[in-house]
Amino acid sequence: GNSVTQMEGPVTLSEEAFLTINCTYTATGYPSLFWYVQYPGEGLQLLLKATKADDKGSNKGFEATYRKETTSFHLEKGSVQVSDSAVYFCALTPSGGSYIPTFGRGTSLIVHP
Amino acid sequence: NAGVTQTPKFQVLKTGQSMTLQCAQDMNHNSMYWYRQDPGMGLRLIYYSASEGTTDKGEVPNGYNVSRLNKREFSLRLESAAPSQTSVYFCASRPQQETGYEQYFGPGTRLTVT
């Protein structure tokens, strides 16, 4: 079956530090890949996505590149802010079958001033 | 557009009580989903509806039932609540049941079963 593996959290950084959250996946074919963000007390919201190999998704200073050869979709940001503190979920939607999304377990990010 | 709305926001039940969680979307999406979120477990799919008139079980359907009332509304029912159903429940919708389309989530219902 399909699976998404994210690095364990929490990730704790100082403001303006570089962020990487690793995400690798297992799926057949060419799934679409997503990063969602969840702020405290809220639902998930889309941060960025990529639908084919070598695509780069970007939004609000965050970036992730769809790497088919390493089955990865790592999230990066050059300079984090306190307001980026949240839980980040990597997810995929398969390219066939029931098209049911698969989510990683989430990575908590804490940014200190 | 309100997006995806859920009611209630909070609920406390006693073991054995029943309740229905309501979800509605105003984006004309075909597909709708119910998830539960527990600490360290990520999101687990309870039921989904690929299109109006269809529903299917997800990863953890036991103890739950759903109704796709119309294209806008998708409700989740707990017939006899158990403490193991204490969780945060999220409803989501998606334009199509295909790859490439992201999900839109509601704000969640925080349920405690005592």
Image (tube, helix red, strand yellow):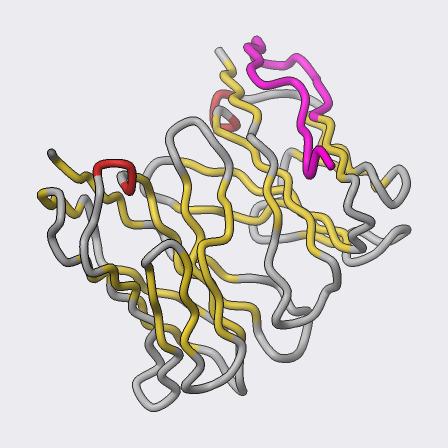
Residue at the bottom extreme? A69
Q: Looking at the image, which residue is at 50% across and 61% down?
A: A102
Q: How many marks are shown on the rendered structure?
A: 0
Q: Which quarter of the picture shows residue A41?
A: top left
Camera-side residue of A88 and A77: A77
Report x, y in % for residue B98.
69, 70
Residue that appears at 28% across and 37% down: A83
Residue A75's quadrant in the figure? bottom left
User: What residue sits 41% from the left and 65% below the top?
Assistant: A58
Highlighted magenta segment, given as a residue range: B1-21
Quarter of the picture holding the C terminus of chain A = top left
Q: Is residue A81 left or right of residue A24?
A: left
Residue A28 in percent (x, y) is at 51, 84
B25 relative to A19 in the view: left or right: right
| Nearer the observer, A57 or B95 | A57
Judge whether residue B56 is colored magenta: no
Q: Residue at x 82, y 49 (%)?
A: B28
B11 lies above or below B65: above
Front residue of A15/B34: it is A15
- Residue sitting nearer the eye, B114 or A99: A99
Q: Is residue B7 magenta?
A: yes
Asked if A86 appears above or below A19 in the picture, the reply is above
* Image position of B71 with respect to B22: above or below: below
Residue A15 place in picture, x, y as percent = 13, 43
